[in-house]
Image (tube, coloured by chain):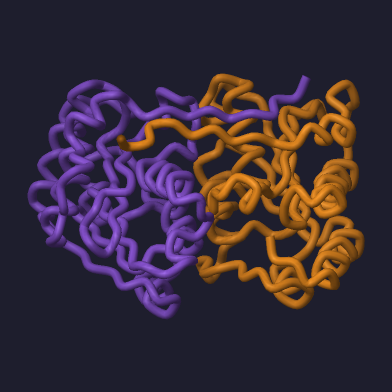
Chain colours: A orange, B purple
Amino acid sequence: MLPLQIHLTLPPWIEDVADASRRYVTDEERVGLAIELSRHNIQYGSGGPFGAAVFDEHGRLISAAANRVVAQTCSVAHAEMLAYMVAQQRLASYRLNEQGGHYTLATSAQPCCQCYGATVWAGIDTLLIGARAEDVEELTEFDEGPLPADWPGELERRGISVRRDILREQARAVLAAYGATGESY
Amino acid sequence: MLPLQIHLTLPPWIEDVADASRRYVTDEERVGLAIELSRHNIQYGSGGPFGAAVFDEHGRLISAAANRVVAQTCSVAHAEMLAYMVAQQRLASYRLNEQGGHYTLATSAQPCCQCYGATVWAGIDTLLIGARAEDVEELTEFDEGPLPADWPGELERRGISVRRDILREQARAVLAAYGATGESY
């Protein structure tokens, strides 16, 4: 029998951290939530030190996610991938901005090669990033993987604006706390 | 209420095409199955013209998948991504070769930027490709997205050997048949 189903879950604490009734207006509020998700993920032992969330142009929260690679035995289950998947299911659209609107992904750290590629197809207009790739590689054992030389430029040319170093020190602090545990999930 | 679950399905005809009791020994048999999956996917209208499968070192089929982006309203649901996810769930390992063994992904066409990045983390040892990126872009409206300049070299340096142009003409024929329909899912 070949498996024909995939079922992935996010931990229930997500709803304690991410407030669907609130408006997240500034870049700092949005990346701040992604960092809070990363912090809780290591605190609860539910995955690696990465969080991400999708917002619409009014700052409404569409999805909130955290890394679930080990818990779900799934190398695809990075925070950004899960944030895209649940947002697309919720909006019933395989490209978030297909019907208009302006969507933003905020992530606690620079997307790896997988999440970078997924970002090209997900239908977002803005990518907000906390920690840099070099922070991830300095403070943890994670590798960002191979990216195009001008990775922000390739996104910009496809209509996705990129803003970096948002609350970078807060994002670095979570990575450092995780790296100090010696865990690797 | 934020969504906290993702459920993805593959179509039931997969089990008519992919034979879990057979050994797929040669590169041509393996890519041949991926191409058959792509052909059936357009024939049944269950997704775009892309198929992929994971095999172990004995040629046993671990997973078989096809593109499900539109059906599942999920830009992540490319054939290669689903093949990795179901194979990892089946083996209960987020890196297929974590416990040893040798795993191969066969895909009907060159992985796009998302599937390329996912390949870096999935735990395969060999990547077998049918059609080239230029075939996909010539014969359909799909875009492969931005890749590192030396994308095969980046995989080789991470221990993943890459073989291309396997049954390329058969793979091109499916892309051409799909392109002629004018569909875009």
Can you give x and y, in whole percent of width and height, for residue A132 in the image? Answer: 74, 66
Q: In this view, does B123 lie to the left or right of B127?
A: right
Q: Nearer the viewer, residue B146 or A32?
A: A32
Q: In this view, does B32 lie to the left or right of A16?
A: left
Is B117 situated left or right of B182 in this image? Answer: right
**Residue at coordinates 78% horizontally, 54% vertically from top-left?**
A108
Residue A39 is situated, as x and y percent measured from the top left of the image, at 86, 52
Residue at horizontal 56 percent and vertical 21 percent from the top: A99
Total labels drawn: 0
Using the rendered view, name the quadrant where residue B4 is placed.
Answer: top right
On screen, A67 above or below B174? below
Quarter of the picture containing the C terminus of chain A is bottom right
The residue sitting at 58% across, 44% down in the picture is A159
- The residue sitting at the bottom extreme is B157
Depth check, front residue: A4 or A82? A4
Question: Residue B153, position in %: x, y?
Answer: 37, 77
